[in-house]
């Protein structure tokens, strides 16, 4: 019995007067005296179904096939993706059913009422809440826009290994495992690989998981998160990297406005403007916060966020020229100012979402820097090999996807901006 | 000192009569008596520079800035991305230099002359060979096309965790590690997560790393590879999943033709046609190969590839209805035929690149299947939870990116279709 498989046809989305079949998961059932209203999940979102009577067993979590005609309507329910139409069904057939006990919580309330712990323990259910789901539609659009903008600028997408023999950032916060009798570590960052690839493709990006074995549990940290990584060469200065990012963020916001109007309205998100972004030296930032030390504490970031808003009307702020002592060995010192680096952090709404800067490209300079930090160049053999083959002057940045999603969507805890988050206490679901 | 960072402007690509600056990595230097020819890497590929004299230290691996005018030319060298123009430089300035010892091998030969081992040991250098680099430009385009096609069909991109508490496929071939005092495993597949997400988004895909702790070293296996994963519901039959894939593969080939004409020509790749794909039941396939057992050996796959080519003129072949005994517990049995499953493999040029099928969506049926295999449902708590909340009838597939790249580009060993491959003996670079 041989048959030929043909390409799948595009499923038409509901438009007024269309007659046909629609199949989807039931989100809600409301039975009134004369009619029953269903909310049905189609790929883009919820659509309302009206029918004279629905079969007995239809309930949330069932999959149904409805046959009917699309009619114009004016619907106020903000969870509906289609609010100017509904499907008048002549037939509703149950295709699959959930278990009899039903959902662990009521998904039809405007906000999910559940403790953070319960919400995450029952992720397969909580993700079905329209407001929670919407944040991930936005997250997917953010990544799509990130890639589209960079593709347009001649960037090449790379995939670096997550299993390696040493960490880019070094230190103790690395997961290690037995790899056929040897020690392997999980990548904390694609840093070395993206730098090496500037010698191959010039401009590269990667979207992938990174792993940090930090035991602390804060609202802004995960043990596995998605890093949007960019690296490009040749550059004339680290400010070019920031310029690239400003254009990129503007494009990402524009794309959200275009693709996610439903989700933005549902979550009542006002997108931040991105025209130019103010920049401040680290030393100047410290004068504003009144703080000390070589890093910015979360409270200092928040203060700087308020400062950028009041002084520049910007939700974004670059802090540049971080102290050399606090930057990794591959960071380039500022010419003539060896105590600071040609580096930056980007704050969004008072929280750091990006670290970046120019990197050392000269092989001799890199080796000297490794030695000056008391490290052994042999531990960075292949990274140095790339430099010896010649790398263009280059720089880049990493942007934490979940943290950016949380800040954008007004989500307080980064775990809730992650489909299936991992922290020191959570390995499931 | 505060400044505002503006969005980066698009760098113009060379067009005839344009006058300007171009900056890039030098690939090759040829000094003739009167003129010097350089090949320079720009983001899209190589361009030829002609100048009266180049500075003394210009060599492969250096970064230079050239000033000049673009002139029309007819160039035969297939490694050049721009073959109908060159840049007549009036000025060439060295911006960065490689180490004095030069490249570990000659990157200007038509083919890289090096053992497979050396090629991979010196990956930062070997990737710069135009033919090797081209395969990764094609790989990036494959993934871009994969996502674009699915985005157009209303799919949502998801990111599932790579750290978990149990493996989707079970068995011994899993990497494990200490996770804050507990055992964690690296994901062998996003199977459970993508299935759960059909209850949230209906149609989902993921592009991400998967990890297999298989100690064997073959030309077609890696210990870390990229899986292009798709899952969708509601579906009426597993053949809908194959239909989706046929349309997807056709779109991917079309996109390659459009975006990668230079790379396809350089590697002399003739893209396979994808209109309809023939399908054959596993039992029928076994009659053709004359083999026994519940699986297809590589030699049998090769024989079936030749059969599909000679009987159907197709480089693709679906083998369907695999024995239940060889499919995972979540595979759906064929209605009325419990010894086989509604599943498929896709062979491309005689090698399996995809496994897929319909999955069990009914919570009671799944739990019974788990028990019937002697496993404990408690070990699949959150997967069963998703089913109990109601999943649509669903199915999907996984496609190995590196293997597909290798088959498409005529690369013999899948390691060479991976930027930085990982096998039992290789953790660097």
Image: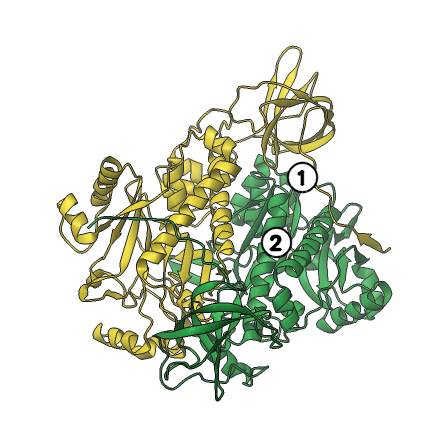
Chain colours: A green, B yellow
Q: Residue at x 60, y 62 (%)?
A: A401
Task: Judge by depth and name the residue closer to the eye, B241 or B20.
Answer: B241
Task: Judge by depth and name the residue closer to the eye, A385 or B69.
Answer: B69
Place of residue B321 in the rendered image (x, y in percent of width and height, measured from the top left): 23, 57
Please, what secondary structure does the residue beneath circle 1 have? Answer: loop
* Label number found at residue A234: 1
Label 2 and label 1: CA atoms lie apart by 21 Å
Place of residue A333 in the rendered image (x, y in percent of width and height, measured from the top left): 73, 49
* Label number found at residue B165: none
Q: Where on the picture, by quarter, is residue B405?
A: top left
Q: Residues within 10 Å of mark 1 (few under 14, many from 20)?
A: many
Which numbered disc, 2 or 1, marks the residue that appears first in the sequence?
A: 2
Q: Residue at x 64, y 43 (%)?
A: A153
Place of residue A238 in the rendered image (x, y in percent of width and height, measured from the top left): 73, 47
Q: Quadrant of the N terminus of chain B?
A: bottom right
> In the orientation shown, which residue stands out farthest toward the top?
B33
Residue A246 visible (yes or no): yes
Residue B216 visible (yes or no): no
Task: Judge by depth and name the residue closer to the eye, B100 or A306.
Answer: A306
> In the orientation shown, which residue stands out farthest toward the bottom?
A33
Using the image, name the chain to which the residue with label 2 belongs. A
Total marks shown come to 2
User: Would residue A396 be found to the left or right of residue B4 on screen?
Assistant: left
Asked if disc 2 and disc 1 are in contact, CB closer than 8 Å, the reply is: no
Q: Where on the picture, by quarter, is residue B43?
A: top right
Up-down: is A224 above or below B83? below
User: Would residue A311 be found to the left or right of residue A55 on screen?
Assistant: right
* Label number found at residue A146: 2
């Amino acid at each position: 019995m041989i048959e030929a498989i043909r390409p799948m046809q595009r499923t038409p989305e509901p438009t007024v007067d269309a007659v046909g079949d629609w199949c989807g998961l039931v989100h809600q059932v409301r039975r009134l005296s004369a009619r029953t209203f269903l909310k049905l999940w189609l790929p883009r979102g919820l659509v309302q179904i009206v029918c004279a009577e629905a079969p007995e067993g239809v309930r949330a979590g069932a999959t149904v096939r409805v046959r009917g005609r699309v009619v114009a309507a004016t619907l106020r329910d903000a969870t509906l993706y289609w609010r100017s139409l509904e499907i008048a069904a002549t037939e509703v057939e149950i295709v699959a059913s959930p278990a009899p006990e039903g959902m662990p919580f009521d998904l039809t309330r405007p906000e999910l009422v559940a403790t953070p712990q319960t919400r995450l323990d029952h992720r397969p259910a909580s993700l079905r809440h329209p407001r929670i789901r919407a944040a991930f539609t936005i997250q997917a659009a953010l990544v799509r826009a990130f890639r589209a903008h960079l593709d347009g600028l001649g960037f090449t997408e790379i995939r670096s290994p997550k299993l390696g023999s040493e960490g880019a950032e070094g230190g103790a916060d690395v997961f290690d495992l037995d790899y056929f009798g040897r020690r392997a570590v999980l990548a904390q960052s694609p840093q070395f690989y993206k730098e090496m690839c500037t010698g191959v493709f010039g401009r590269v990006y990667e979207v992938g998981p990174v792993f940090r074995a930090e035991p602390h549990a804060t609202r802004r940290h995960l043990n596995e998160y998605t890093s949007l990584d960019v690296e490009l060469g040749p550059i004339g200065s680290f400010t070019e990297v920031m310029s690239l990012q400003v254009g990129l963020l503007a494009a990402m916001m524009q794309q959200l406005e275009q693709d996610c109007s439903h989700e933005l309205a549902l979550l009542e998100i006002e997108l931040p403007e991105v025209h130019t972004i103010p920049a401040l030296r680290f030393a100047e930032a410290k004068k504003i916060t009144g703080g000390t030390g070589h890093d910015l504490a979360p409270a200092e970031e928040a203060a700087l966020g308020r400062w950028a808003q009041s002084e520049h009307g910007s939700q974004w702020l670059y802090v540049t020229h971080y102290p050399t002592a606090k930057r990794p060995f591959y960071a380039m010192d500022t010419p003539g100012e060896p105590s600071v680096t040609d580096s930056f952090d980007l704050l969004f709404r008072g929280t750091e979402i990006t670290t970046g800067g120019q990197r050392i490209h000269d092989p001799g300079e890199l080796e000297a820097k490794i030695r000056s930090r008391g490290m052994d160049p042999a531990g960075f053999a292949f990274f140095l090999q790339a430099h010896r083959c010649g790398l263009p002057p280059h720089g880049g940045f990493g942007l934490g996807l979940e943290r950016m999603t949380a800040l954008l969507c007004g989500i307080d805890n980064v775990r809730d901006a992650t489909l299936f988050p991992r922290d020191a206490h959570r390995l499931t679901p």
